[in-house]
Image (spheres, rainbow, N blue to C red):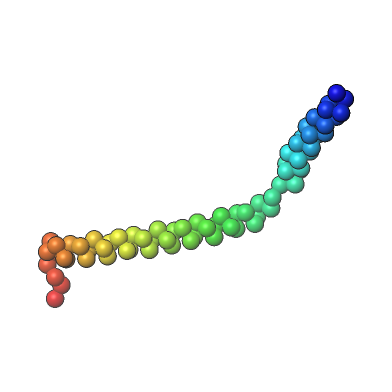
Amino acid sequence: MSRNIKSILFMIGAAVFGGASFYLVPPNTTELQHKLSENQGILHKDVMESRRNNQLLMETLQLEAGLVPKKK
């Protein structure tokens, strides 16, 4: 029985120490901010490209449907 109690106490201690170590050694926030900034730039570029593609698709569909006179 005491073996089970020691095992349980060890597991609890390991969990507490593992959780505390994350707070004692936080990740490098400057690096995370830099990566976030890069990802936001990439996302903005992708959104703008998607908008341009959607606009071109709409213009093409309208031309094919005869809704817009063709440019001379």
* Residue 9 in view here: no
Tell me if 61 is positioned left or right of 40 in this view.
left
- Give coordinates of residue 61: x percent, y percent: 20, 62
The image quarter in which residue 31 lies: bottom right
Furthest toward the right, the residue is 2
Q: How many marks?
A: 0
Q: 56 or 30: nearer the eye?
A: 56
Q: Residue furthest top?
A: 1
Residue 21, horizontal then vertical, whole percent: 76, 42
Q: Is residue 62 left or right of residue 28?
A: left
Give the residue furthest to the front.
1
Look at 71% across and 47% down and name the residue there. 26
| Any part of residue 12 in sight | yes
The residue sitting at 86% across, 28% down in the picture is 3
Along the line of sight, the residue nearer the viewer: 11 or 18: 11
Q: Pick whichever, 49 or 12, lies toward us.
A: 12
Can you say which quadrant of the picture contains the N terminus? top right
Q: Position of residue 25 (x, y in %)?
A: 75, 46
Q: Which residue lies at the image location 42% right of the left edge and 61% below the top edge?
A: 46
Q: Position of residue 36 (x, y in %)?
A: 56, 55
Q: Is residue 65 left or right of residue 30?
A: left
User: Residue visible at 44% across and 58% down?
Assistant: 44
Drawn side of residue 2 relative to residue 32, left or right: right
Relative height, residue 31 to residue 4 (above, below): below
Q: Which quarter shows the C terminus?
A: bottom left
